[in-house]
Amino acid sequence: MATAAATIDTVTLADRAATRAAAALRDVQREDGHWVFELEADCTIPAEYILLRHYLGEPRDTVLEAKIGAYLRRIQSAEHDGWSLFHAGAFDASASVKAYYALKMIGDDIDAPHMARARAAIHKAGGAAAVNVFTRIQLALFGAGSWSVVPTMPVELILLPRWFPVHLSKMSYWARTVIVPLLVLAVKQPVARNPLGVHVDELYTLKAAPLKSQAAGTKRGWQIFFGALDVLLKPAEPLWPKRTRAKAIQACVDFVVERLNGEDGLGAIYPAMANSVMMFDCLGYPEDHPHRAIARQSVEKLLVVKDDEAYCQPCVSPVWDTALAAHAMLEAGGEENEARAKAALEWLKPLQVLDVKGDWAEVKPDVRPGGWAFQYNNAHYPDLDDTAVVVMAMARAKDKLALAGGYDEAIDRGVEWTAGLQSKNGGFGAFDADNTYDYLNNIPFADHGALLDPPTSDVTARCVSMFAHLGDGPDTPRMAAALDFLAKEQMADGSWFGRWGVNYIYGTWSVMCALNAAGLGGDHPSMARAADWLISIQNPDGGWGEDCDSYRLDYAGYEPAPSTASQTGWALLGLMAAGKVDHPAVERGVRYLVETQAEDGLWGQEHYTGGGFPRVFYLRYHGYPKYFPLWAVARYRNLKRSNERQVAWGM
């Protein structure tokens, strides 16, 4: 097949690939017009799901447990015998302890070969004492570890005034929703029902292990200060006035209840949802209490159950998947594909949050709501990335498709809300403005390094693309500030950091699209350097790849990694945004996608190319290798056939 393809011009091959991929993508669109694909994390979420059920003492579902067990065993590494944070990644102690505990809870014999190998690997890494804060809490809740090794976060934190240096509103949305119910659990220190009485004493060694921070830019002075504060808080914990403590606990409950979000759950993310269930449980809420029942149901909706395996997703991504797939279908073109894009936009329109001022209003109280969330429903936490992508799809389609009721108002409100959340440094974060309290990354509780939501290059780029797509020139105040932010963020090698996608390929693609949309062509120094960098890292097979290890704190430049469909799509879209459609690297990249297209018309990909929290949590978007390669090959075909070298869209 490869030999035959070599005799066919690349444009024809790209056209055939786009036609097949678009047809396949149409086949997996839901009847109501939306797309949603699996969103897979590491072993920790399905392991925690197993532990949650045993924590609550729920009746055992042995069939489901067997399927989750099969999943956990399959993804155990044959290289290091433990579990990783991403496909083919290095050993991670916290993930391995949770997976081992879940398998033991399911009933795996600790002397079975896979368990013995895992236990030896955990011992080699320091044992169960060498885990992160959230794993220490998980162990403490089962009486399998001590609360004394968990950094203290007094529940009274929720009562502090906003000017106080450590305040919930100064943390990211995901940290806020996870921590608030956790504050109640930490003060109540409940013990799991654990009907089988399963513990993991055998994972401990005789050595204690200090917490290791994964945060970037930590300061030794701040760490010493907060460490000393933690030492002082521990003996003071029982001395808080009972009335104040009761008031604080009630404030946490009120916070959670206001944001319960129906069956979509607190923050629409698993850790917050599970913590809310355990909070209600430890406060004595019966199983049939509406708040506890809806919180518990929200967790079940995250399950992916197949014939032989099952796992629990960290959240779902329907708005993100639908908006990006709509862009790909618009690029693919043709009456049927455009009709499917129209159906997607009709599904997206009523999901715009117009009536809820979420937590973002703490900093921007005068801004009207108007964003879209990532999930089916998460009204308190819309995000700027989704909003910009949805708005650009609507703007691209509105003049071409007859859209019911028009989209001008939805577009205007989306732009207004996005512009209102621009940070002081010109950039945009994902969920909040000016969430830049870097000193908080030094508190012991923040060992995961993901307590904040500062402006990033990729989200800022998406907002710039949206503004430019709708007519903003580079000299408008909001554009000038954002472009200045992006100029300062460019790396010495020409790339940009990708916070929400892996990593520099994702960030560079995002910014190149933005600069093109803003009128800074391929000859602009920033664009030229970025294009040169992408070309320089192309793999011999014609594709592009980058490993999640590129997020490590001692990153010193790109290191080769296996090509993936999604990263190849990003690189191609970036190069075409820089006017490089005729460059040999682009043709090689397109041919790589043509040659790796699967029989079903789409692309497969086991490697994780989604960012959750750098160095801590990564995501495998099952939709990424479906719509990004389609988008790239269709754009290549379109540009080559039109003899147009300028990409006309924001993405």
Image: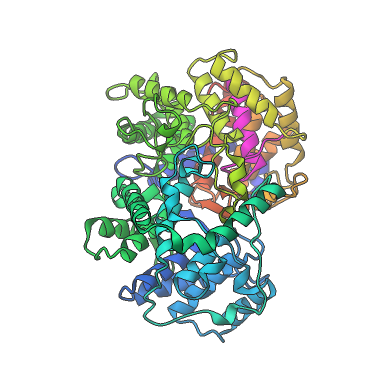
Q: Quadrant of the C terminus?
A: top right
Query: Which residue: 65% across, 55% down?
Result: 213
User: Which of these two is toward me, 361 or 372?
Assistant: 361
Can see residue 299?
A: yes
Residue 105 in the image: state x and y as whole percent: 45, 78
Query: Which residue: 28% across, 49% down?
Result: 262
Q: Is residue 512 magenta?
A: yes
Residue 370 in the image: state x and y as whole percent: 37, 28
Span shown in magenta: 495-518
Q: Is residue 233 above or below residue 588?
A: below
Can see residue 308?
A: no
Q: Is residue 610 magenta?
A: no
Query: Which residue: 35% across, 44% down?
Result: 376
User: Which of these two is toward me, 377 or 199?
Assistant: 199
Residue 303: image quadrant is: bottom left
User: Which of these two is toward me, 35 or 558?
Assistant: 558
Q: Is the image coloured rainbow, by chain, by secondary structure, or in one colour?
A: rainbow
